[in-house]
Image: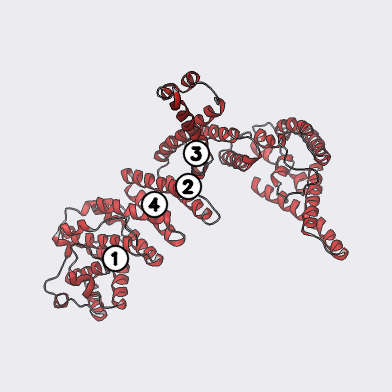
Amino acid sequence: MHNLGSDEDETSNPSMQLVDEDSSVMKKGKVTNAVINSWCELVKKDSESALVSLLNVYRAACHYGTESIGVPETASCQIIQNSETFCSILMFMLCEVDNIFRGLLKISSSSCKKEVILELKNTSKWKSLKPLIKSYLRSTLFLLNQVTDSEILAFSLSRLRASIIFFAAFPSLLHRLIKVTVHLWASADGVLSSCSFLVIQNVAVVFTSDFFDICLRRTYMAYIVHSKVVDSINTKHVQFLRNSFVELCSVDVHKSCTKALLSIQKLYNILKQALRTKNKEGLDGQKMHECFGSQMNLALQGSHALLFIVYVQEAMKKICSWQYINCIDLWVMFISANVRDYELHHIFYLIIQLINGVACLFPGPRYFPLRKKCIQWLNHLSNSSGIFIPVSSLVLDVLEYKMAKEGGKPGKICNFSSVLKWSYHISFPEVATIPLIFLRKFPEVATTENQRRMVKRLIDQMEQNIEFVQKKRDEVAFSPNEHQSVESFLQLEKCSLNAPFTQYYRSVMQKAFSWNLDANGIKSSLEHKKTKRKRGLLSKKVVNESVNSETETQR
């Protein structure tokens, strides 16, 4: 059972019990399905008395099985006779009551502006219906706190979403709605989580201002809590939480930008602590005081200095946590989604500094997955913004570490289709400069002759491609500012697949396929002949698909 809010305040107002004293059925404390159906027909004929009776039974149904203070003893125990009656009252109220209230108040079924309700607050019709509307909203919120069936919860949320404008008259109920929907959004999954987010999004859109801030703050904190641990089970859900939060931020990008700036600055401060810890290891208390200022006032003597070292070293552990990584991932997605439409350069460059700092903080093969993630973030930011962000040094630092032993098994084939894109780009001679510098140093640290030979061939192919692109570039008449002409550079050669670097790429992919097939074990010579025939076709297919996908991307 969920227990996110209390319904006790409902009893503070006796009128909210809405008991129709003229109803003999209510006095007897028994309601059958036939009675429910008759009331439903009367309500459709604008019978307010029948509506009051239905709301009483609906309230009892929502409290069914609980011992809520203020709920008449017969209400939840004797009024609902069986499951059929329970389902009938819930289905009718959730499906029809929104249209009933809108019809009585003369509100269009498509209207979703809170001003419509605020304008009606002083009318006599609103004053007579206000207790009924409040009872319905409160009862449904209480139901959300008690029911555990995901289908009932999802349906109830979808109907509350239809009645979202009525919450304009009840701010306290709106706070409770935000609380329960954020909880369900973060803790549930599938349809229920999606329905919960749609309610949160509607609240942010309809009520804006302070309630957008509340939604943003609560969803961010829920995301932080649920992203502490990521595994194969919850990876997709964490990604869903991230994507939906970014979508929520788009409701008010300027306010979201303020939140992003504060969060990124906090992440950056943790990084600075970690960098100081790494760079100042072994310093005495006086030097650490000069480095950290007032934070060292109580950490200059004895065990206090040791405690401080432990404190700052915790910063490095935080950076290696899923929570820290997922926070960066969240703001990278937010910035990438909005950087072209809004002025976000102040946080854009700050998060680039943050990512570069994280990538360089932990050297060594153990942290290559973290560095790979940092490179992916930078590439994503670059693609989204159209601003060049250099990542070659982060990639090529990997070559300085010994990664395999002599005679080791080859790894799985990777798709390096992006290499083809840049091999045809007009800026390839400049882009290839830094990678070539690193690649020429690789033979000094290579552990096997095979590695040196492969890298030497790659260097030769890159140098040939630089000459090829440079020669073609010298033949054109357009300037670098003519973007359309720049994008169409070497398109004919790219589509023909006959360029030298493409031929080299094809041979590399073919060899990779051969390694993979051999690793899987070829049992007979006949099978070997069959698979050998397929290798060329497969490698050609991969190259063609890579080139075609890159061509479509550029278009």
What mark, if any, has residue 318 been given in the picture?
A: 3
Q: Kindly report the distance in space between the C-alpha atoms of the residues bearing marks 3 and 4.
A: 31 Å
Looking at the rendered structure, the secondary structure element under dot 1 is: helix
Q: Name the N-terminal-most of marks 4 and 2.
A: 4
Q: Kindly report the distance in space between the C-alpha atoms of the residues bearing marks 4 and 1.
A: 22 Å
- 87 relative to 342, above or below: below
Q: Nearer the viewer, residue 386 or 153?
A: 153
Q: Amino acid at mark 3?
A: Lys
Q: Nearer the viewer, residue 102 or 515?
A: 515
Q: Residues within 10 Å of mark 4 (few under 14, many from 20)?
A: many
Q: Kindly report the distance in space between the C-alpha atoms of the residues bearing marks 4 and 2.
A: 24 Å
- Which residue is located at x 31 percent, y 43 percent? 210
Q: Name the N-terminal-most of marks 2 and 3.
A: 2
Q: Name the N-terminal-most of marks 3 and 1.
A: 1
- 304 relative to 38, above or below: above
- Which residue is located at x 59 percent, y 41 percent? 370
365 vs 295, left or right, is right
User: Where residue 311 sits in the image (x, y, percent)?
Assistant: 46, 32
Q: Are marks 2 and 3 in contact (CB under 8 Å)?
A: no
What mark, if any, has residue 228 been given in the picture?
A: 2
Q: Kindly report the distance in space between the C-alpha atoms of the residues bearing marks 2 and 3.
A: 11 Å
Name the residue carrying label 4. 201
User: Where residue 64 sits in the image (x, y, percent)?
Assistant: 27, 69
